[in-house]
Amino acid sequence: MSWLLRPLTEQAHALRSGAVTSAELVEETLRRIGCLDGRVGAFLRVTPEDARAAAHAADLRLRAEGEAAPDLCGIPIGLKDVLCTEGVETTAGSRILQGFVPPYSATAALRLAEAGAVAVGKCNCDEFAMGSSTENSAYQPTRNPHALDRVPGGSSGGSAAAVSAGLVTVALGTDTGGSIRQPAGLCGVVGFKPTYGRVSRYGLIAFASSLDQVGPFARTVRDCALVYRAIAGPDRRDATCSAREVEDPCPQLSLGVAGLRLGVPVEYVEAGLEPGVRRVFDEACQRLAAAGAGIEPVSIPSTRFALAAYYVIAPAEASSNLARMDGLRFGPGRPDARTLREQLEEARHHGFGPEVQRRIMLGTYALSRGYYDAYYRRAQQVRTLVAQDFARAFAKVDAILAPTSPTLAFRLGERLTDPLAMYQSDVCTVPFSLAGVPAVSVPAGSAEGLPVGLQVAAPTFADALCLRVAQAVETACGVAEPPALALEPVR
Amino acid sequence: MSEGALRASDLGPALARWEPVIGLEVHAQLLTRSKMFCGCRADYAGLPPNTNTCPTCLGLPGALPVANAEAIRQTVRTGCALQSRIPLHSKFDRKNYFYPDLPKGYQISQYDLPLCVGGWLEFEVAGVERAARITRVHLEEDAGKLFHGGEIHHGGSSLVDLNRAGVPLMEIVGEPDLRTPQEARAYLVALRQLLLYLGVNDGNMEEGSLRCDANISLRPRGDDGLGVRTEVKNLNSFRILQRALEQEVLRQAARLEAQLPLRQETRGWSEAEGTTVAQRSKEAADDYRYFPDPDLPPLTLSPAWVETVRAEVPELPRARALRLRQAHGLSHEEARGLTERPREADYFERVVGAGAPAAVAAAWQLNELAGLCQRTHRSLEASGLTPEQLARLLVLVDCREVSGATAKELLAEAFGSGADPAELVEARGLRQVSDEAALTVHVEAAIEAQPKAAQDYRAGNDRALAALVGQVMGATRGRGDARVVSRLLRERLPRDPPS
């Protein structure tokens, strides 16, 4: 089996023992991308030269520092294309940013690079992270490695598919309303959205600033924890990034769930879960109970308003965040435009895809004079209620369990013409986003040959506890099998 | 469009029938080291275009703002000086609109929770004390600058310089409490002076680091309703503020009297036409879609911090003028003149502190030094003349050791050269000759040399004495004490009895 399908911890060990070099891992990555990504479409661009240079540097460092080298040293990673990378084109999956080469890197990407991780390329995503299937990318669709006619979820579908297919060991994604967790669930990998404010957003091309959070994808919970540990923490360049010290999740990962109280929100399981999803979720809960956890129902009454509130707040912020895309300083622009108005309208009309235009209009409307109180202010009130509901629930239980997605991975094109059905994909993930709490999706089993994820959420800044419970799920349900595609021989 | 400049002589009659209601919005760039939300320099003067920029002030995707604590401090200090209430909770909001000088497509400003609320500004108009209420003081970021090669909306090309984008900008919004253009000017003079005292702005209206917009409407005298107002922009000097408002009074009065409608609109001052011209109509009110900036956490100030900042407020101009009058027996005009700028008041106090008599110091600083500053385009600090040097010279003048004429020449020489005038006195032997015995020799020689003048004076022609004094001064190379010389001459030239 390919090195890249083994856990990061194993690769790290082999890199230190000399069983493999970073250069070899990176060549294998590039080979696998060359062989498999034509069918998956996880990467928008691959940077072999940069990757080989970084791998060489990592090998020198491993030799020099040995065991003291950071866990991620020499490990091939993928970065969602909403994360700015110095000197490497960054488009956020949008035409309007075609050719934009940032003069700086996102803090999260920079921290991984400093830890010696080797970025091999930029992963596909829905345009400006708006979508739940990665079909809104202006460049290409990404396919689910478990079933190529199905979506990988979104918006971080490229990152999830890249890890699922074993193209990279780990990848970074971003999550606004479920964009890490939902694709992780649909692709059968672990995806973690830390507490809002735990990871710097500097260099993350904003969708909805009050919700966006950077987080890792990996094959195992421990691997996720290692990446999280490397990227989390204060950053003076992001005023919303917490100054709190980061609690190291690794020492407590294996503590298990015996004696912990885990809540299951009744509103989540009652509402429209596909039978396969329901079965896997119930079985996972039983296994956790068998492992000593107390499983009890909790209520999050505001759940039924959460999705609506989210689809007001996020587009409102997006309508303002995307105003800087005027084609004047970056992107293709309209050099032939004759007036300022023409320049703006043409650049934005041709630069943005239909879903982005739809959300800009929704958000602009929600913030308009005369509508602000009815939409934006009301949505923020709902957000407060959601946070209060979770605070109440967390007074009773240590963590919350929920399905990640109400459905299995759907077919490409199936929901493209029905935005509301697409928005429904986020119903189980959005409430945790509104509350700002940490949440992780862990593979819990499969149905109809497709992966099913389970979500674990914990109180704000209890990211370590969140990962500890996720580890217990992984222990109880087993690490997900890689897709058949990932096991194909690669030359 | 322009209706042409209206005659200023009509202003009196217009003001007799109509009462202007004027409020000013003043934007002041703060004197911080860095920009409002990034580490670029706040002082962009003289830098090549677009070199004082970074991802944040260029509005590049993914770049984030971090608020400048010093800018918040200077704004709160200003609020304290204006007697504003300083709420402990404040926040930044986004004001959304598209314009090429605004790289993010929104300006970070403050909407409903400004840093400072209420307050008032005291000022003086033609010797009368007045006060106008302050609505609010808030903090925002400046935009870039556009250089138009043509009309940007109609096919021309324009260049964008973002060196200024993101410079901290404090907006001081005044209540419409001003009733004449002259009063508006006096308000702005006082506000500028206050900002200089607080050390938060350089007061440079020409360069645009202090900018003023005015809202003005007219109502019939005796009425207390409000008319249709216009907003007049680009008022970048005291003179233009007053002239533009006078023109608006005339224009609005003429329209009202002709029963023509007034539009709520934005007008700008046109120097070429000597009047205001319409810029855009505000009938379709702009919708800036303000909402709290999610990139910046709400601000929470502690009462203790606010008190620390309050304690930083220095002695303000009016208090200082009063103290100078009381401590040094200066006149109202002298005290006001010396306290116009804080550095000049500091200078005066140091001159007095170094031993110069206050009355002499005030007279010399306000007349001779002010004149030198104006002629040489140098400030006192840049002149190289220290207060201590000036004090030594003025002590010599006061003891009549140096003549006034000599002192003036020495000051002119020292100003800008760094020379010490009192040292020049010694080096060149310029001490005034007051010794009567020494002067008597010259006096008698002068009478002998100009018998005609002596005779004329004795015959009652006062002006003839000047020629004799001049002769003595010439003989003493200007060092003779003119008063002693005059007395000695008069003693020797008794007037003839009237015939």
Image (cartoon, coloured by chain):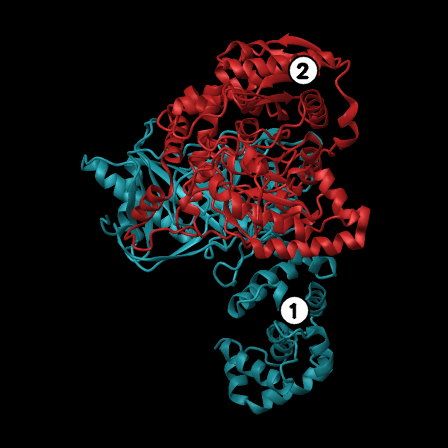
Residue B3: x, y in percent? 22, 48
Any part of residue B169 in sight: no
Numbered circle sitting on residue A394 = 2
Mark 1 nearby-residue class (10 Å; few <14, some 14–19, many ≥20)? some
Spatial CA span between label 1 and label 2: 70 Å
Residue A351: x, y in percent? 37, 44
Residue B395: x, y in percent? 71, 66
Instruction: Give whichever of A436, A46 is nearer the camera.
Output: A46
The quadrant where residue A452 appears: top right
Q: Chain of mark 2?
A: A
Chain B, colour shown:
cyan
Mark 2 element type: helix
Mark 2 nearby-residue class (10 Å; few <14, some 14–19, many ≥20)? many
Numbered circle sitting on residue A35 = none
Residue B54: x, y in percent? 55, 53
Instruction: Give whichever of A94, B381 is nearer the camera.
Output: A94
* In-image side of A134 versus B373 (left or right): left
Whether residue B182 is situated above or below residue A293 in the rendered picture: below
Whether residue B113 is situated above or below residue B420 in the rendered picture: above
Whether residue A430 is situated above or below residue B250 in the rendered picture: above
* In-image side of B386 versus A98 (left or right): right
Same chain assignment for discs 1 and 2: no
Amino acid type, mark 2: Phe
Q: Which residue is mark 1?
A: B384
Instruction: Give whichever of A414, B410 is nearer the camera.
Output: A414
The quadrant where residue B119 appears: top right
Foreground disc of the pair 1, 2: 2
Q: Chain of mark 1?
A: B
In the rendered view of the protein, which quadrant contains the N terminus of chain A?
Answer: top right
Instruction: Give whichever of A29, B148 is nearer the camera.
Output: A29
Chain A, colour shown:
red
Amino acid type, mark 1: Gly
